[in-house]
Amino acid sequence: MNLNKDSKKLLSEFDAYTSPHAKMAEALKELKEEVMADENINILLVVGPSGVGKSKLAEIFIEEILDSMEEEMIKDTSFIPITGIELPNPDLGNFNWKDFYYRVLLSLNEPLVDRKTNVNRGVRNNDRYVNEGRKSTVGDLRRSLERAIYHRRTRAIIIDEAQHFFRLKTGKAVAEQFNSIKSLANMSGAKIILFGTYDLISIMNLDGQLSRRVEEIHFPRYDLNNEKDVEDFINILYTFQRKLPVEKPPDLLSERKYIYEKSLGCVGILKTWLQKSLRETIKNGEETITLESLRKTSMNHTKLLTLFKEIVVGEEIFKESKSDAIELKKMLGVENLEDKPNKRKGNNNPGKRKPNRDEV
């Protein structure tokens, strides 16, 4: 059975729907505070498991910033307070900076991106410097981007799938890559927000210089070991139950254990799964989403196990390790600062004479 226009519309509407939930709201609030903070930290990391909803968070954040700046943007049509791109996976482990600058310039509505040039290297013709057909170099695009950010008064640049920045062959190359990002943030004055998987944190922790120059925001999954997370996850299921465009609302709550197992507590995975089940339900002419359709469209256990192992490793990074704290104290010699009896010799009351007889 082919989907008709009405069916496609229903699928499209549900796909566009974003379920408001606690983890998203917390991450969004923290992100706004960090971006607006007047501090020297100008690189932010927003990290979480695959399928938790990081791309949707980035999308909502951009929309809210643009909405809040709408009046100012109307007064000054050149003003672009925030922009964002999705970073492609580098080919053969070679990151293409020229392509990166090109994409960000396009997101800023920069004209004639292909014709950028350094006027000091052009050819003088009738008192003007001309390009003479030379293609833009990496340096040309970098300078153009810095100027564009300055003139557009752009405050933040969001880079989604930012772990692709660092999929390089050597640790030295990774450090140089980060330094290039840091340099762009410093020279342009914009905050660069890197959205990505837990790989980003692992990379930052390889080097003390890198880890101290960024601020991290954790966007976690819902954890059944946390009572509030359990309550919030059930509320999410109830919301989806009501929003799914089917004749009869499905009973997702009664299958909450199975749904949690197959979504790992990640709302992004859950939403994609429900979208597939909805399509299957509409195609079969059924009145509601059933357990059978959920089983048919769920991710297999092998993939889920791989994802969950990555999640466990990533979550451990954000947990304060007691053994690490003890090791740090030992290496710093903090014990030497603890209160000890005063063993200083000599007069404990300077300026006051001891009760001895003076010589005659």
Image (tube, rainbow, N blue to C red):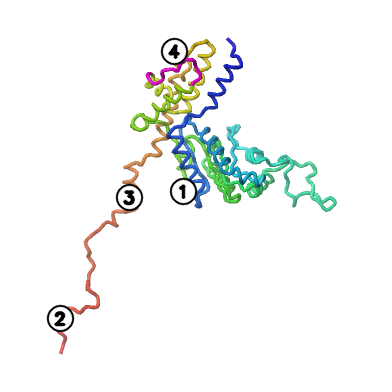
Judging by the rendered image, the residue that carries numbered circle 4 is: 292
Looking at the rendered structure, the kind of residue marked 1 is Arg
For this view, does 48 lie left or right of residue 3?
Answer: left
Name, please, the residue furthest toward the right: 126
Mark toward the start of the polypeptide (2 vs 1): 1
Looking at the rendered structure, the kind of residue marked 3 is Lys
Judging by the rendered image, the residue that carries numbered circle 3 is: 329
Q: Residue 114 carries which label?
A: none
Judging by the rendered image, the residue that carries numbered circle 1 is: 212
**Marks 3/1: CA–CA distance:** 19 Å
Looking at the rendered structure, the kind of residue marked 2 is Asn
**Marks 1/4: CA–CA distance:** 50 Å
Mark toward the start of the polypeptide (4 vs 2): 4
Q: Nearer the viewer, mark 3 or mark 1?
A: 1
Judging by the rendered image, the residue that carries numbered circle 2 is: 356
What percent of the width, then of the height, locates residue 156? 57, 44
Q: Please report the residue visible at 56 percent of the width from the left and 38 percent of the height from the top.
A: 62
Q: Which of marks 4 and 2 is in front?
A: 4
Along the line of sight, the residue nearer the viewer: 336 or 6: 6
Against 154, residue 310 (above or below) is above
Residue range in magenta is 244-254
Mark toward the start of the polypeptide (1 vs 4): 1
Against 344, residue 80 (above or below) is above
Mark toward the start of the polypeptide (3 vs 2): 3
